[in-house]
Amino acid sequence: MADFAIPYPDFQANTVADSEKVDANFAAIAAVVGTNNFSVNNYVADGASLTANLDAVDIALKSLNDLLSTKVKIDSWDVFNDDLNPPENIEWGAAQAINFANGVLSRARFQFRADILGYHKRIFLRLATSTASASALGLNVAYRINSLGTSQSVTTALWQASKVYSASDKVIGLDTGGDWREFTAAGGTSNVSEPTWPTTGTVADNGWNWTAGNVIFKNLDLSHTPAASVGDFEVDSSSLQVPSSEITAITDEIVGFFWRSAGDAHAGDLYLLDGWNKPVEA
């Protein structure tokens, strides 16, 4: 049976113990039915034991059902203030939103727990646009999975034009394989145009090299065309989900950032209003 967490009142429940209780109660039911066969002498005791264990199983299974049927809100979206064009926190109607301007790369980071094994974790988004344009938006979710207790100190800095980099300075770049990879500088002043980041080896930058390292964030991308009207809409797509095969413990932390492709076809700004995560069947 899969380990799971009870979603209410919070996500700090003893998830391993919950799963073990379900297994133990099923075992107790099997023992009562299989060995005693409800004889006249022990009918009352066996019946009470069976009822108690069935009640415990029912409670645990309802908790699991709640987890599988509920979208969990991502409470905090933090902007990267060191980006050249950080997204702005704005008001959109009566709601708060993060504005991703047209034509620039900006990011908003998130974090949530896995809380269940054997299921993909899908990220749902509620978005809006500033213009009534039925043109494609480039929606992206970059993520990594941290085990409980591991450091989250990883490179998040983006490459900048005409910047002096010291030897061993690090940036992340979207490589030709589609993921955010770490690159280490040999040292020098960067060019006016960003390099095409490889998956291995080195890449030249104004007469000196960057060396490719490990993938820091895997990237999920979706081209989404909204209706030709100004208003909010939800995005629910299998393209924006973390595969179950990469989640190895219920305590895993999924961290990363939402970003908009700078060169997408939509002429207006994009507003991030809300986000949720939810397990979906693998």
Image (tube, rainbow, N blue to C red):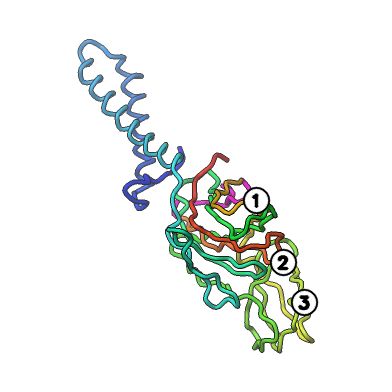
Q: Quadrant of the C terminus?
A: top right
Residue 100 point in image, percent of width and height:
58, 66
Number of the front mark, 1 or 2: 1
Labelled disc at residue 238: none
Question: The disc labelled 1 sits on which kind of residue?
Answer: Ala
What residue lies at 42% left-to-right and 58% top-to-bottom?
Answer: 94
- Pointer 1 or 2: first along the chain: 2
* Secondary structure type for disc 1: loop
Q: Are dots 1 and 3 in contact, CB under 8 Å?
A: no
Question: The disc labelled 3 sits on which kind of residue?
Answer: Val
Labelled disc at residue 175: 2
How far is mark 2 from mark 3, CA to CA?
Answer: 11 Å
- Pointer 1 or 3: first along the chain: 3
- Pointer 2 or 3: first along the chain: 2
Q: Which residues are magenta?
A: 238-251
How far is mark 1 from mark 3, CA to CA?
Answer: 41 Å
Residue 206 point in image, percent of width and height:
78, 85
Q: Is residue 98 above or below residue 190?
A: above
User: Which quadrant of the structure image shows residue 196?
Assistant: bottom right
Residue corresponding to mark 1: 228
Residue 240 painted magenta: yes
Residue 34 painted magenta: no
Number of the front mark, 1 or 3: 1
Labelled disc at residue 203: 3
Q: Is residue 65 above or below residue 48?
A: below
Q: How many marks?
A: 3
